[in-house]
Amino acid sequence: MRIDKYLWTTRYYKTRSKATDACKKGHIKINASNCKPSKEVYIGEKIVVRKNQINYELEVLDLPPNRVGAKLVDLYRKDTTPKEAFENSEVLKYSKDYYRKKGTGRPTKKDRRDIDDYTEEE
């Protein structure tokens, strides 16, 4: 089975074309090497999927005949993603909280108070 079809059937991507684009951009690795969307997937291979700044690590247990329901996905793959990857995404979410985009103008009174409170705590 092709890697783009496998990722679509195991519900890592909503459409097969999005899975294909991820392969072309280099977000998918099979056994630690980049792959094309047409690369065949076999049972026992290790796949790394970079999605939303998290590296999901998968092991292929079986090949599904077609797109499966969310409850049946665990029959076809084993997720070995470390918990630290999810914790890092939480830290990133909090770090973006005080980020202001360029060109949004001067800080408001509330923004200034929040910045002052933040700098005083340190």
Image (cartoon, helix red, strand yellow):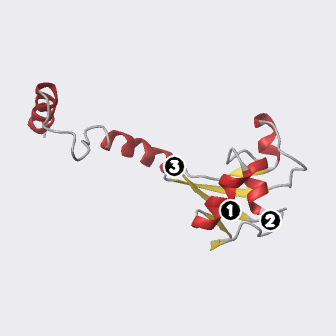
Residue 47: which numbered mark, if any? 1
Residue 31, image quadrant: bottom right
Left or right of 103 on screen, residue 97: right
**x then y, percent, for residue 96:** 32, 42
Q: Quick one: SS at disc 1?
A: strand
Q: Earlier in the sequence, mark 1 or mark 2?
A: 2
| Mark 1 → mark 2, Cα distance in angstroms | 9 Å
Residue at the spot 25% in from the left edge and 38% down from the top edge: 98
Pointers 2 and 3 in contact (C-beta within 8 Å): no
Pointer 1: residues within 10 angstroms few (<14), some, or many (20+)?
many
| Mark 3 → mark 1, Cα distance in angstroms | 16 Å
Q: How many marks?
A: 3
Q: Quick one: SS at disc 3?
A: loop
Q: Which residue is mark 3?
A: 52
**x then y, percent, for residue 33:** 64, 74
Residue at the spot 15% in from the left edge and 25% down from the top edge: 110
Which residue is nearer to you in this view: 5 or 61?
5
Left or right of 92 on screen, residue 30: right
Quadrant containing the C terminus in the rendered view = top left
Pointer 2: residues within 10 angstroms few (<14), some, or many (20+)?
some
Which kind of residue does numbered mark 3 sit on? Asn
Q: Is residue 90 above or below residue 44?
A: above
Q: Earlier in the sequence, mark 2 or mark 3?
A: 2
**x then y, percent, for residue 6:** 78, 55
Pointers 3 and 1 in contact (C-beta within 8 Å): no
| Mark 2 → mark 3, Cα distance in angstroms | 23 Å
Q: Earlier in the sequence, mark 3 or mark 1?
A: 1
Quadrant containing the N terminus in the rendered view = bottom right
Residue 11: which numbered mark, if any? none
Pointers 1 and 2 in contact (C-beta within 8 Å): yes
